[in-house]
Amino acid sequence: MSRNPTTRSIRLRRSVLSVPAINPRALEKTHAVDCDAVIFDLEDSVAPEKKAEARENLRNFFSARLLQGKERIIRINSLSTDFGLADMELVMALGPDAVLLPKVDEPQDIMALSDLLSEADAPEDLRIWAMIETPRGILNAAVIAEAGRMPGSRLDCLVVGLNDLRKETGVLPQPGRSYLVPWLMQVVLAVSAYGLDAIDSVVNDFRDEQGFDAECLQGRAMGFAGKMLIHPAQIEPANRHFSPDPAAIAEAKAIISAFADPASDGLNVINAGGRMVERLHLVQAESLVHKARLIAARQAAARKTM
């Protein structure tokens, strides 16, 4: 399916909570938390001897009651392993919103999973998320993102995994992630070119509130849609930092109103409050206002369930 970066649908992915499928208590808590999406992890957080138990936990969780108002993603093991093939059987049985494929190095990884889903007659709205967490994944970020334009591709989102990337490159933790910024921006540039979302990497110390706030602000400034989380305490600040602020919403509405004025008919550039505004700013403004409305609707729905 071909995608136009300026017309792709917008989903809230400010807070993407990763939950170990081996932990039934953590799974149950996802009903009560206010994250936008949940990654049910069958890979890194589950020991090899516990993989079957984790799959059974996830089967029981999905069959008990529907997780309302959150995108549901299952992080599988590599398709080159027996674990990954068993995970895919579970995916087909449970019908999540997306599959998160680990350690994506090249577009062929995406297309192999797309083909597998098509052969299994998976619903067309079952999407693919890709973990970009290796040197090859970073180097190939653009061609991986471009795979989202290939016929039959289900690619929807790239998720940066800095823990594995640091391990493979030997890059040491630095304030402001200074040595990692070029790689992060490479992923953002790739998804921007091909109409996908990018999710920023985790902060391992969930007690470091100041460090988490700083990374959220940095990630939003870079262009990430949201952040991958490891603890419910990170949800509220992630939602706050990756939401448009009231001043930005007001400015966006003013731009929309200015272009709606009959005096602006046929003009690609107008004067809006003393600023030169182009139609590309109108597209950005409409996107921002739409996101704000999605957030407001989500908050209203949450209040009704309280």
Image (cartoon, rainbow, N blue to C red):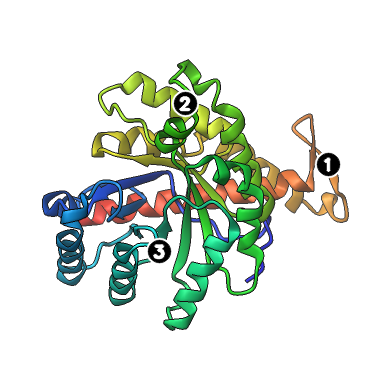
* Distance (Cα) linking label 2 and label 3: 27 Å
Question: Is residue 294 depicted above or below 199 in this figure?
Answer: below
Q: Amino acid at mark 3?
A: Leu
Q: Amino acid at mark 2?
A: Gly
Chain-order first, disc 2 or disc 3: 3
Residue beneath disc 2 = 170
Question: Is residue 298 depicted above or below 83 in this figure?
Answer: above
Q: Who is closer to the viewer here, 258 or 42?
A: 42
Where residue 265 appears, as percent x and y from the top left, is 85, 55
Q: Could you tell whether 93 is left or right of 114 in the image? A: left
Residue beneath disc 1 = 270
SS at mark 1 in the image: strand
Quadrant position of residue 86: bottom left
Label 1 Cα neighbours within 10 Å, binned few <14 / some 14-19 / many ≥20: some
Quadrant position of residue 151: bottom right
Image quadrant containing the N terminus: bottom right
Res. 258 visible in picture: no
Q: Could you tell whether 50 is left or right of 226 in the image? A: left
SS at mark 3 in the image: loop
Q: Nearer the viewer, mark 1 or mark 2?
A: 2
Q: Could you tell whether 115 is left or right of 32 in the image? A: right
Residue beneath disc 3 = 79
